[in-house]
Image: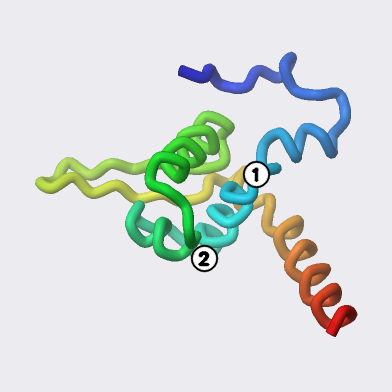
Amino acid sequence: MKEKTDVKELPACPVETTLTLIGDKWKVLILRDLLPGKKRFGELKKSVGNVSQKVLTAQLRDMEESGLVNRKVYAEVPPRVEYSLTELGQSLKPILDAMQNWGEGYKALIK
């Protein structure tokens, strides 16, 4: 099992650190879909798109270990699990907004 990322293990370059934490296609889409609020696993799987259950589970666990995502398990039958962004995860909103604006501008430019 992967251990929590230690500050000593993070790259010296801040851009590389950010990419280490969210530089995966699925992680960015998970962040995008959790920005409005909490979601259950099935809701995330549908909203993120063509991601396998195994990959989504692995990405969520990694993001939880990095302190970006909260996982709340309810003691119910059947069990209910909800995912939400931590305060640290929410702090990535300006980055995602900038990515959206750039993508929109790029699409407009190449049409």
Residue closer to the observer: 96 or 67: 96
Label 1 close to label 2 by CB (< 8 Å)? no
Residue at image location 53% in from the left, 45% down from the top: 86
Q: Secondary structure at mark 1?
A: loop
Residue at image location 47% in from the left, 52% down from the top: 51
Up-down relation of residue 101 to residue 8 (above or below): below
Residue at image location 83% in from the left, 68% down from the top: 102
Badge 2 amino acid: Pro
Quarter of the rendering occupied by the N terminus: top left
Q: Residues within 10 Å of mark 2 (few under 14, many from 20)?
A: few
The image's mark for residue 48 is: none
Q: Residue furthest top?
A: 8
Relative to residue 47, is residue 40 drawn left or right? Answer: left
- The residues bearing labels 1 and 2 have C-alpha atoms spaced at a distance of 20 Å
Badge 1 amino acid: Asp
Q: Quadrant of residue 12?
A: top right
The image's mark for residue 36 is: 2
Relative to residue 43, is residue 68 drawn left or right? Answer: right
Q: Say which residue label 1 marks.
A: 24
Quarter of the rendering occupied by the C terminus: bottom right
Residue at image location 72% in from the left, 17% down from the top: 9
